[in-house]
Image (cartoon, helix red, strand yellow):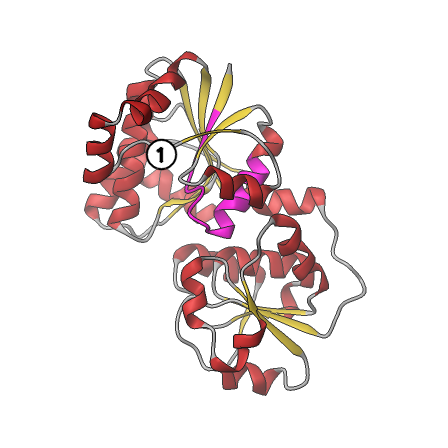
Amino acid sequence: MKTLLVGNFGARNIGDELILASALEDYPDSVVMTVDGEYSQTFTEKEFETVPFVPTGIRSFLRFLFSAKYQSRILWLNTKIVQVVFPGGGLFAITFRACFLWFLVFLWMKHLFPHTKVIFEHQGVDSKLNWINRKLTSFVLSRADEVSVRDEMSRQAVQYYCRREVKNVGDRVQKYVTQHFQPQKEKDKLVLVNAKQPWKYWDLKNRFPVREKIFIGFDPSDMHFVPQEMQHSALFPKNKTELINLFQKAEFVVGMRFHSLLLGAFFCSDDKTFVLQKPYSEKVQNFVREHGLSQLS
């Protein structure tokens, strides 16, 4: 009997794959629900059983109805799963699409495994969700067997939405890197940069005129925001080792995405990690406030 790990895996978001890498340390004999099993195994550098995502849209529902192979790969799970774990991330955050997606996934888990524990761990939950998103979030988290969160604001949000006490156990990736890696004392004159929105290269050049600068994508969409001056030094890490090696060598990190800042704060220290622009989400706002990070410009 195995644990089923469910999250935004296989979509090539490095933060989510780091969550998976961490969860596999705690649940080594797991089946992973991922949209791209080959990518998830390549990035985490581990082999594990995979299963495709349950249908959550019109096309995937039609595929489920008419593809016996897809249907069988989903339905065989109920013979071997002892618990379902959503191991972390900001699932109920920012958009209606995200909240509705994970609401549907939760319904599927309850349908497929009616007598199995469904657990949400290290969750990031926005405190300013609109009415419909609050209802979706409350429906799911109030019916989950266990819930823990990654920061104090998320704990307060869950308490307000669901009227249930939950533990703040910290961020799963932060726990993972703290337990498995150490910052290097010897650093290259290197600045790692991550962005998910348009930004001005001049601000970076003005702050770090002589250091090497590398743009590092944490999601495929980030690569649309590589400035012309950094086209030759932009990269998207292929696996966990390549990612960690870059952060261990870097002297400074300038980022937008949550996990770029988290890795920067750990490997380079809070005073050498900068926010490229105003935080785009509550999870980033909370992290910036907690660690006292400065904005680049």
Residue farthest along the right direction in this orientation: 186
The residue depicted at 39 percent of the width and 64 percent of the height is: 280
Whether residue 202 is in magenta: the answer is: no
Residue range (magenta): 4-23
Residue 284 lies left or right of residue 109; in this view the side is right
Q: Report whether residue 171 is seen.
A: no
**Disc 1 target residue:** 53
The residue depicted at 58 percent of the width and 60 percent of the height is: 291
Residue 73 screen position, x and y as percent: 37, 23
Residue situated in front as seen by the camera: 19 or 293: 19
Quadrant for residue 47, please give it. top right
Image height of 69 relative to 275, above or below: above
Residue 281 screen position, x and y as percent: 39, 59
Residue situated in front as seen by the camera: 274 or 208: 208
Residue 132 screen position, x and y as percent: 19, 44
Q: Report whether residue 82 is seen.
A: yes
Image height of 275 relative to 62, above or below: below
10 Å neighbourhood of mark 1: few (<14), some, or many (≥20)? many
Quadrant for residue 224, please give it. bottom left
Residue 252 lies left or right of residue 197; in this view the side is right
Kind of residue indicated by mark 1: Phe
The residue depicted at 25 percent of the width and 41 percent of the height is: 100
Image height of 296 relative to 46, above or below: below
Residue 6 screen position, x and y as percent: 43, 33
